[in-house]
Amino acid sequence: MATEDPMVAALLREREGLMQRGLTARVAAVDEQLKLRGAEPPADGKTDKPASRSTPPKGRRARSTETT
């Protein structure tokens, strides 16, 4: 499930990790937050693939060399 909202994407990643660890009470809390943000949590508790970030991370900028 790809999403444009970074918070929903983060919640989906968190939910996946909680499911792997078997923390069902925390999964229910994350599902509630997903519903509040207008996203539907996966029905079966399993996702086809790991939830990905909506945008890739930006590369680091090299420091400029200062000459004085």
Image (cartoon, rainbow, N blue to C red):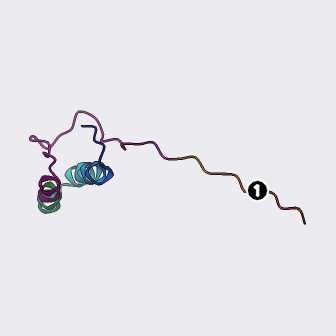
* Residue at the image position 33 percent from the left and 51 percent from the top: 6
Q: Is residue 47 magenta?
A: yes
Q: Residue at x 45, y 42 (%)?
A: 56
The quadrant of the rendering that contains the C terminus is: bottom right
**Vertical order, 47 against 63 (above or below):** above
The image quarter containing residue 27 is bottom left
| Above or below, 55 relative to 67 | above
Where residue 51 appears, as percent x and y from the top left, is 30, 42
How many discs appear? 1
For label 1, the SS is loop
Label 1 amino acid? Ser
The outermost residue toward the top is: 48
Outermost residue toward the bottom in this view: 68
Q: In the rendering, at what x and y percent does residue 66 appear?
A: 83, 61
Q: Is residue 61 left or right of residue 12?
A: right
Q: Which corner quadrant holds the N terminus?
A: top left
Q: Residue furthest front?
A: 68
Question: Residue 17 vs residue 38: left or right?
Answer: right
The percent position of residue 42, horizontal first and vertical second, equals 14, 42
Task: Please check the rendered image and state whether residue 37 is part of the magenta-colored stretch, yes or no.
Answer: yes
For the residue carrying disc 1, how many other residues have a C-alpha within 10 Å: few (<14), some (14-19), or many (20+)?
few
Give left or right: position of 30 versus 57: left
Q: Residue furthest right?
A: 68
Q: Main secondary structure of the magenta part?
A: loop
In the rendering, at what x and y percent does residue 61 appear?
Answer: 65, 51
Whether residue 29 sits left or right of residue 55 in the image: it is left
Q: Which residues are magenta?
A: 32-57
Q: For mark 1, what is the residue?
A: 64
User: Which residue: 9% across, 41% down?
Assistant: 43
Q: Nearer the viewer, residue 52 or 54?
A: 54
